[in-house]
């Protein structure tokens, strides 16, 4: 669960959640408060994703990008703070179990060159937790030819 208190310095000095893509496979996100905050980056521009009552936002994370050898792209997003209102969101991250492999699927790399390394879920988790929540660094580290 994410809690963003209201903050008068919302626009210049304070950030809610820095730009990142989720390290998981698939994220289901519930925007609990009817307050704008979530933004996604597309073609270099930030777009708001307005809360819709009862709707879940489905985000593709790095693991799905890696499993599909880059066919499905992870989405970069951030959360901004509102000057007057608090905001709550709940994210459920879905990933393979420990012991499974995070790497391009065999049935895909049968026919094309793998773009990413294959790591055990434990090794991948170690890599994730050694990085800051910032931009695209984890996927860069997973690339075979960065
Ligand atoms: O608060 C939000 O809308 C985004 C939360 C998020 O990106 C996350 O928990 O990874
Ligand atoms: Fe996220």
Image (cartoon, rainbow, N blue to C red):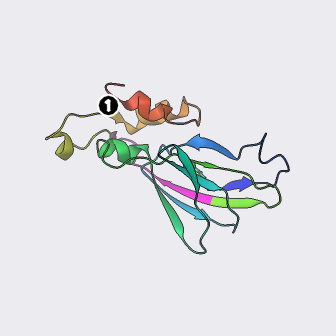
Q: Is residue 100 among the parts visible in the rendering?
A: no
Q: Quadrant of the N terminus?
A: bottom right
- Rendered residue at 80%/61% (across/down): 85
Residue 36 percent across, percent down from the top left: 67, 61
Foreground of the two, 8 or 107: 8
Left or right? Give the position of 114 relative to 91: left
Q: Quadrant of the C terminus?
A: top left
Residue 40 percent across, percent down from the top left: 54, 51
- Rendered residue at 78%/60% (across/down): 86
Whether the magenta-drawn stretch holds residue 35 is answered as no
Residue 16 percent across, percent down from the top left: 70, 47
Q: Which residue is mark 1?
A: 117
Question: Farthest residue toward the top?
Answer: 145
Q: Based on the displayed image, in which of its 4 quarters is residue 132 positioned?
A: top right
Binning the other alpha carbons within 10 Å of mark 1 as few (below 14), some (14 to 19) or many (20 upward) gives some
Left or right? Give the position of 29 relative to 13: left
- Rendered residue at 32%/31% (across/down): 117
Q: Is residue 116 among the parts visible in the rendering?
A: yes
- Rendered residue at 24%/34% (across/down): 114
Question: Farthest residue toward the bottom?
Answer: 54
Q: Which residues are magenta?
A: 90-101
Foreground of the two, 139 or 1: 139
Whether the magenta-drawn stretch holds residue 94 is answered as yes
Question: Farthest residue toward the left?
Answer: 111
Q: Secondary structure at mark 1?
A: loop
Q: Based on the displayed image, in which of its 4 quarters is residue 144 positioned?
A: top left
């Amino acid at each position: 669960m994410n809690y963003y208190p209201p903050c008068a310095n919302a626009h210049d000095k304070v950030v809610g959640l820095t730009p990142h893509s989720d390290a998981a496979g698939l994220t289901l996100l519930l925007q609990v408060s009817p307050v704008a905050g979530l933004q996604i980056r597309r073609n270099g521009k930030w777009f708001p994703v307005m809360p819709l009552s009862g709707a879940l936002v489905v985000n593709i994370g790095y693991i799905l990008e890696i499993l599909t050898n880059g066919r499905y792209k992870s989405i970069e997003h951030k959360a901004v703070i509102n000057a007057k209102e608090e905001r709550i969101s709940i994210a459920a991250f879905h990933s393979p179990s420990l012991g499974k492999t995070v790497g391009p699927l065999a049935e895909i790399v049968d026919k094309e060159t793998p773009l990413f390394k294959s790591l055990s879920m434990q090794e991948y988790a170690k890599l994730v937790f050694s990085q800051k929540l910032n931009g695209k660094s984890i996927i860069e580290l997973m690339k075979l030819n960065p």
